[in-house]
Image (spheres, rainbow, N blue to C red):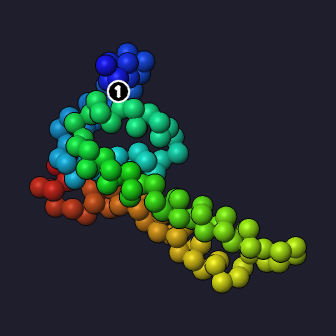
Amino acid sequence: FFWVGVQRNFPQKVNWLKLKMADMRPMNMVLFFVSLRVSPVVPAYLLNLAAPVTPLPLFHFWLATILGCAPHALVTVTAGATLSRLGGGQEVGGNNLGLILFLLALSICVALIPTAIKKFAPASMAA
């Protein structure tokens, strides 16, 4: 019932996602979903709605969501906690600046994982 509504309201986007994932191996599907989660262009609600219609198993969807959303959430929460502890006229560059920069670098690395695997993986794994 729910999936019919998703397919009826977003037919082009769901078909595009199905076609992209049709011939992928499970690990490639996870990496594809991670890259979609990290991308600010694709709305998260659309991925959540389209996931049941795609051939991606629930555990792989969960794993892709954790890998794609956790780094950004960690950076945002750490930056918010640092800003909330600041008093008037204090600098942000305290002890947490290194942590914020590390988490930002980690989120960039997670965003580049699908590209790196596609470029450096053996042909049998990348196919």
In which quarter of the view is residue 14 placed?
top left
The quadrant where residue 63 appears: bottom left
**Residue 45 spot, x, y in % from top left:** 47, 36
Q: Residue at x 74, y 68 (%)?
A: 84
Front position in the image: 47 or 77: 77
**Farthest residue, direction bottom:** 95
Question: Is 54 situated above or below 30?
Answer: above
Outermost residue, right direction? 89
Which residue appears at 28% of the width and 60% of the height? 117
Name the residue beneath numbered marker 1: 14
Work out whether 112 lies above or below 60: below
What amino acid type is highlighted by mark number 1? Val
Residue 12 seen: no
Q: Residue furthest top?
A: 8
Whether residue 39 sits left or right of residue 96 in the image: it is left
Residue at the outermost front position: 1
Asked if residue 81 is positioned above or below residue 43 in the image, the reply reads below
Residue 99 at least partly seen: yes
Rendering coords of residue 68 (x, y %): 42, 54
How far across and down, in percent of the image, does residue 52 sit?
29, 33
Tag 1 secondary structure: helix
Q: Does 124 sit left or right of 6 as displayed?
A: left
